[in-house]
Image (cartoon, rainbow, N blue to C red):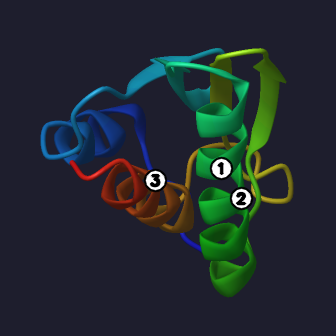
Amino acid sequence: MTRLTHDEVELQLADIPGWGISQGALHRELEFANFVEAFGFMTMVAMAAERLGHHPDWSNSWNRVVIDIRSHADGGITDRCVELARAINKALGE
C-alpha cells in the first residue's frame, strides 16, 4: 500500500462523492430506512473489504452507519483506502 499525502487524498475524493477526511481517515456517515437495510449494506461492504484485505473502522446504530478508513500499519490514508471507499460507493449504487 502507498500512503497518500493530504493533497493526493483530496484529489482522489473529487471522484468519490460523500467522503471527507476526519482525524486522518476517510470518513462517511450514512442513514438507511431501518436496521435491516443498514446491516445488509454492512454485509456487502464486509465482503468487498475481505476481497481487498483492507477493513474499515465502523459502527452501526439502528439505521446509521459511520465509516472510517485508514491504514493502521501505514499510519494514514493509502491507495487501498481509496479503493475501499470506491467499493463502498459502488455498493450504494453511486
Q: Amino acid at mark 3?
A: Ile
Write down the quadrant of residue 53 in the picture. bottom right
Q: Earlier in the sequence, mark 2 or mark 3?
A: 2
Q: Secondary structure at mark 2?
A: helix
Question: Which callout, 1 or 3, points to the residue nearer the camera?
Answer: 1
Give the x, y percent position of residue 62: 77, 15
Question: Which callout, 2 or 3, points to the residue nearer the camera?
Answer: 2
- Apparent side of residue 81 relative to residue 60 in the rendered image (left or right): left
- Apparent side of residue 53 relative to residue 17 in the rendered image (left or right): right
Q: Secondary structure at mark 3?
A: helix
Q: Residues within 10 Å of mark 2 (few under 14, many from 20)?
A: few
The residue that label 1 is drawn on is: 40
Name the residue rendered at 42%, 63% in the picture.
Answer: 87
Q: Amino acid at mark 1?
A: Gly
Write down the quadrant of residue 51 in the picture. bottom right
Using the image, tell me which numbered label, if any, was put on residue 23. Answer: none
The residue that label 2 is drawn on is: 43
Name the residue rendered at 76%, 46% in the picture.
Answer: 75
Pointer 2 with pointer 1, Cβ within 8 A: yes
